[in-house]
Amino acid sequence: MGPCGEYAAFTIMNQSPRAFAAKLDFVTSMGHGEGGDHRARLGLKTKGPTKLITDLCVFEPDPVTKEMTVTSIHPGVTQDEIKAQTGWPVRFAATLTETPKPTANELAVLRDLHARTARAHGTA
């Protein structure tokens, strides 16, 4: 595996039935495809997504099937809310955790990034 295949690939997005559809009309970026070894069969050398972070929870691929599975739920969010915002029967890990709240330093870095992005786009 090349050096790119050793890095984690995180995806961050809002969760909704439209974004988390049961069936796709087209694919804009390759995830784990049909699961299992599908990426390898296509000749892809990278790992694919290792975490999917939404506004509700964190998904990680099952080690064998590669199905995206909820491993952590953000504070105040319920499994029913996640199910309602997912277009397929979502799986939850057997050892489900609560996502830790961000530290003061993490919040400061995110707020600074947000402010710099707004200034760069002329919206500050």
Image (cartoon, rainbow, N blue to C red):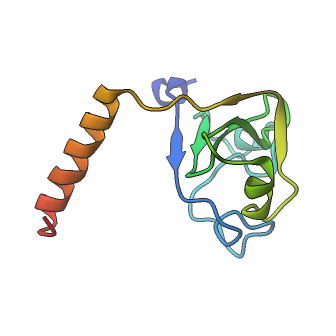
Give the vertical position of 96 relative to 67 (above or below): above
Q: Observer-nearest residue: 75 or 72?
A: 75
Residue 42 visible to an observer of this rendering = yes
Count of picture labels:
0
The outermost residue toward the front is 76
Outermost residue, bottom side = 25
Q: Residue at x 79, y 69 (%)?
A: 23
For the question of whether residue 49 can be seen, the reply is no
Image point (67%, 48%), residue name: 77
115 left or right of 51 in image? left
The residue depicted at 61 percent of the width and 41 percent of the height is 74
Percent x, y of residue 98: 65, 31
Return the x and y of residue 52 as percentages of the image width and height.
Answer: 60, 44
Left or right of 27 in this view: 21: right
The correct choice, above or below, for 12 with respect to 84 in the image is above
Quadrant (top left, top right, bottom left, bottom right) of the C terminus: bottom left
Q: Nearer the viewer, residue 80 or 26?
A: 80
Q: Quadrant of residue 103?
A: top left
